[in-house]
Amino acid sequence: MSVVAADVAPAAPQPGARPVLRCADLRRSFGERVAVDGVGFEIAPGETYGLLGPNGAGKTTTISMICGLLRRDAGEVFVDGRPIDIGSTSAKGAIGYVPQDLAIYPDLSARENLRFFGRLQHLRGRDLERRVDGVLDVIALSDRAKDRVESFSGGMKRRLNIGIGLLHGPRLLVLDEPTVGVDPQSRNAILSSIADLESEGMAILYTTHYMEEAERLCDRIGIIDEGRIQAEGTRRELVELIGGRDRVTLVASGPLGQAAVEIRALDPRIDEVTAGDGAIEILVTEARSILPAILSTAASAGATIRTVEVVEPDLEAVFLHLTGKALRD
Amino acid sequence: MSTLAIAQVNLVRLLRDRTALFFIFLLPVVLIVVLGTVYGGRTAPRLGVVSAGSGALGADLVKALAGGHMRLEIRDFASEADLRSSVERGTLELGLVIPPGYDATLRGGGDARVTVLAQPGRVLALEQGVGSAVAAESAIVGAARLAQARTGARFDDALAAARAAAAGVAGVQVSVEDSGKRIFPTDIGMFSLGAQSQLILFMFLTSMTAATQLILTRQLGVSRRMLSTPTSIATILFGEMLGRFGVAMIQGLFIVLLSAFVFGVDWGDPFAAGVLIVMFALVGTGAAMVVGAFANNPDQAGTFGVFVGMALGALGGAMVPIEVFGEPMRTIAHVTPHAWAIEGFRTLVFDRGGIVEVAPQLGVLGAMALCLLAVATVKLRRQIVGG
């Protein structure tokens, strides 16, 4: 799947331009449970913003409020300068929403699904047919346009799911975990096409719990957990939050406290050492070069080391640092 | 336009479902034909007659039976064996065998014997009625033979004189009067009752079938996706309602038009019948929306919908005519929309009523539709916008 950028020049993110999406202080509770607690961010034209967080972090609830699908308890959303709420029908035309579920009719053909959602976007006649043909090309389903969706593979259904969101040329494309359950080949194709869309100047909000997708696609990333944005920035900015340091985890037994003290004193590149329940966590610059000395010191302090894990700085490490848990927890 | 798009997609999806097509277009026709053929509109008792070779007097006897007050439907049979078989199988209420030579025997002064065939214990009154008619005809023949013997006139002249005298002789007149209304008029077509019942039964059942689509649309997340477009929640709900209403109307119009043009069924005042169908379609729409809103999955909706449709159909007189219900059941039946709709059609077809005469039924059906649609709207709205 690839997007042909016919007469649209590739556009770089325009942080100074008026944001396509601006949301602030979004809050939503379900009974006693707070799902989203003060989330806010902006997305500029041509920018891809990733919401990275584990399942249940509040990504879909945030997206639902942004797309006007869910009432919010507080906060505000503006898309292309216009406020969005459940009743903001005309303003929703600026949004292309691609839900995590395959929200398509399996007993209709690909073309019929596109036509149906096109009509809901107030597209008519030749314009509708032209756009349907264009999207079918983009999602590489032109030769299967008349086939019922129920006969499609999972990847083809995902592509159609995305195509429906593109049909009306939205200013903001909202993709909620679009690659869940997709085989690696189709995932790669989907990610490539999304990257192409960004280059066409579309603002994209992308939620995922796959770190590698966020790193590959997103200009900026908001790390979300327990309904709050824990940190936000470019990948580089986020990694710098943990000082660009490697994290070494020694799963061990014995006098771990004593071992931690001795490791801390070993080298000035070792910034932080904490002894916990059956493990020593070490934040260190250039872990690979200093690792033998660390292991030797721990052993000489009487610790019995069972496993060693070295995590070089990436978004997973940032997430771990910020929340104390892994993305896939 | 979005409303129409949503309604249209519902219709397209339903018409692609082969099972639904069977229930919408084939089964009702089969049932109308079967019910019409077996039970439809027949009110005259059937008398089978074997009269080959019985002569003019045999023909006179058959004519007297056909023209009598019993309004018999006479069917000719070639042999006594065939006649006996039909009586035994119950396709005839009664059989009459007039032997060959009946005419010659009577003219010659002999005794002729006719045989009446009936199942034991059945239609005693009818049996006696036929016996009386035979006796009356026999009395005229006896009078003619007496006149022939006394005056020497020809038998045919004496018979004509006896018939003329029998008509003019004063005696005991038995007058038969109808007490109360006939349950069903005698002039309705054989398919009329079946068509009315099947119309009501299947409009409701088909609506219920369409409820499963609503659940699928919800479960697939298509409803929420619609809300992400420039489409209001009211438009989405109205579109879904319109889709279900369209399904019910297609079912209704199919049965009405087919039964009218193919089977000659009379539906009464077209305008009033149309309004009645629209009102009942709205009730079906409301019921389908309620099931679609409250059921958890399509299987549950399908099972529950068919059960409710059949139960209400049976209770409301769409399977067995409501007229044969006892009084308490007839009152209870009116908790169903089916009973009101059927009552409306009876008024239009049997009593030749119009829109004014069916206004009470229309009012009740309208109120039922309004309540069901209101409940479904509130529930679906909550579901789509997530509370």
Image (cartoon, coloured by chain):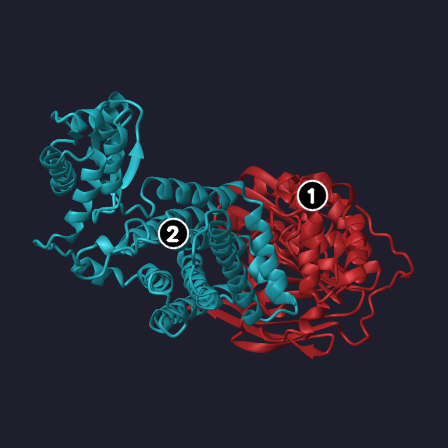
Please state which of residues A183 and B345 is positioned toward the viewer in this rendering. Answer: B345
Report the amino acid beneath label 1.
Met
Query: Considering the numbered disc 1 on the image, is that residue within a helix, a strand or a loop?
Result: helix
x and y percentages locating residue B78 in the rendered image: 31, 24
Q: In the figure, residue B50 lies in which quadrant?
A: top left
At horizontal 12% and vertical 43% (from top left) the residue drawn is B125
Q: Quadrant of the N terminus of chain A?
A: top right
- Relative placement, left or right, of A112 versus B53 is right
Please state which of residues B273 and A327 is positioned toward the viewer in this rendering. Answer: B273
- Say whether mark 1 and mark 2 are on the same chain: no
Q: Where residue B4 is drawn, which disc sits there? A: none
Relative height, residue B195 to residue B242 (above, below) = above
Q: Which of label 2 and label 1 is nearer to you?
A: 2
x and y percentages locating residue B233 in the rendered image: 55, 70
Relative height, residue B385 to residue A176 (above, below) = below
Relative height, residue B211 to residue A17 (above, below) = above
Q: Chain of mark 2?
A: B
Query: Considering the numbered disc 2 on the image, is that residue within a helix, a strand or a loop?
Result: helix
x and y percentages locating residue B187 in the rendered image: 34, 54
The answer to whether one can see residue A300 in this image is yes
User: Badge 1 is on which residue?
Assistant: A156
Q: Which chain is cyan?
A: B
Please state which of residues A316 and B50 is positioned toward the viewer in this rendering. Answer: B50
User: Badge 2 is on which residue?
Assistant: B192
x and y percentages locating residue B62 in the rendered image: 25, 37
Q: Chain of mark 1?
A: A
Q: Which chain is red?
A: A
At horizontal 25% and vertical 56% (from top left) the residue drawn is B183
Report the amino acid beneath label 2.
Ser
Residue density around tag 2, few if under 14, some if 14–19, many if 20 or more, within 10 Å? many
Residue density around tag 1, few if under 14, some if 14–19, many if 20 or more, within 10 Å? some
